[in-house]
Image (cartoon, rainbow, N blue to C red):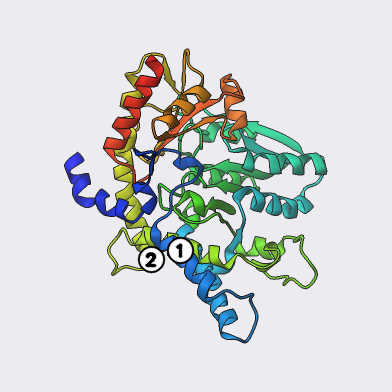
Amino acid sequence: MPGQVERTFQIADVRAAFPSLELRDAGTPRIYLDNPAGTQVPRAVADAMMRSLLETNANLGGSFSTSRLAGGVVAEGYRAAADFVGAPDEDEIVVGPSMTALTFAISRSLAHSIDPGDEIVVTAMDHDGNVAPWLAVAQERGAVVRWVAFDRETWRIEPAALKESLSRKTRIVALNYASNLTGSVNDVRALCELVREAGALSYVDAVQYAPHGAIDVAAIGCDFLACSAYKFFGPHVAVVWGRAALLKSLHPYKVRPQSDAPPAKFEMGTPQIELFAGLTAAVDYLASLAPAQDARRARLRAAFATTSAWEERLAERLIAGLRRLKGVEIVGVTDYPGLPHRVPTVSFTHACVRPSQVAAELARRGVFVWSGHNFALETVRRLGIDEEEGVVRIGAAHYNTIDEIDAALEALEGVLSA
């Protein structure tokens, strides 16, 4: 019930943690609905990064105090990331500049196990960051690429469709947890079970799911999982979790003095220590939304249970409003049966007005959204949507309000009727 959600989720307190939510452009309030491309950060994240730069600014491995303190910042970043994804050990965490960069790095290492005629499975639902690296591996190693289509009724990768694409030659399957264009959430546990039964490795892109739901790699049963901190209220840094035995066995591309042990062998050069500080602060911020007496992992699960209920309200309001607008066609699930099937990212096209025009006009009214294919290139191709124009994408986060959704819908109605 709406009243119960408000009692358990204090939106005013949440918004107070984010200074950017108070900013205006020429007196017009900003409505941040561009969140699937990157969220705003709480003050605690910015403060943690600033403290790192001002108080622990040194390279690692020295005997002096700033170097030792910097090492502690990095170590805590690994622990926080492990808690965030439910990893058994922080040594299974690899940190890098972006999900795409890390996926290319891991894919190059995995390529050594790919022989001509082997098969790599990718989906038409994924961001190209979890497609292009595997296409490159297939081209370099002479492997066969198998594409899995998403179901046009459920908007997910259905287990039966994936099973048809698996064979004794399958070596790697790249999947996403949630689509950055349609918002649909895959049953990754069931999909990864099929991959495991086929004797292949699963690589899960959880970038779009991570801001909206708790992740547990052990429960999922995947082999690798990637996410980006700047999508869950942190700095521009990414995380890949991999099974310990796999990370140890993979051939790294590295400089000779670099350690042969993970995660160091996958992380080239000096780590961005201030970003590790921001990563920890982002995870701690999310955990702070739950009672403090529990361990961080438990608090994260509790916090996401609360934020997802609020986001469900936002998405229901947004979808209902879009369905009332003439000429609007939503690309994805419209009945929003709860977080297990959709995140609050909603894309649409209009019969007469181009997505780029809609986004530009909304921006003039202080409503920030995206247009285009949003790197879900194969998705728009399979849907027959113009690649250049793509869709209008509106994505809510837990700091958005019902009033902001209503204001965005009002502004959109004005744009479409002009």
Q: Secondary structure at mark 1?
A: helix
Q: Which residue is mark 2?
A: 296
Front-most of 123 and 7?
7
Read off the residue under disc 1. 83
Taking the image as drawn, is residue 387 in sight? yes
| Label pair 2/1, CB-CB below 8 angstroms | yes
Residue type at numbered disc 1: Asp
Quadrant in which the N terminus appears:
top left
The part of the image, by quadrant, that contains residue 323 is top left
Q: Residues within 10 Å of mark 2 (few under 14, many from 20)?
A: many
Amino acid, disc 2: Arg
Q: Residues within 10 Å of mark 1 (few under 14, many from 20)?
A: many
For residue 112, above or below residue 318: below
Label 2 and label 1: CA atoms lie apart by: 7 Å
Is residue 272 placed above or below 119 in the rendered structure?
Answer: below
Task: Pick the quarter of the image with the C terminus.
Answer: top left
**Residue at 35% over, 20% down:** 414
Instruction: Give how far across and how far down residue 86 sits, in percent.
Output: 47, 60
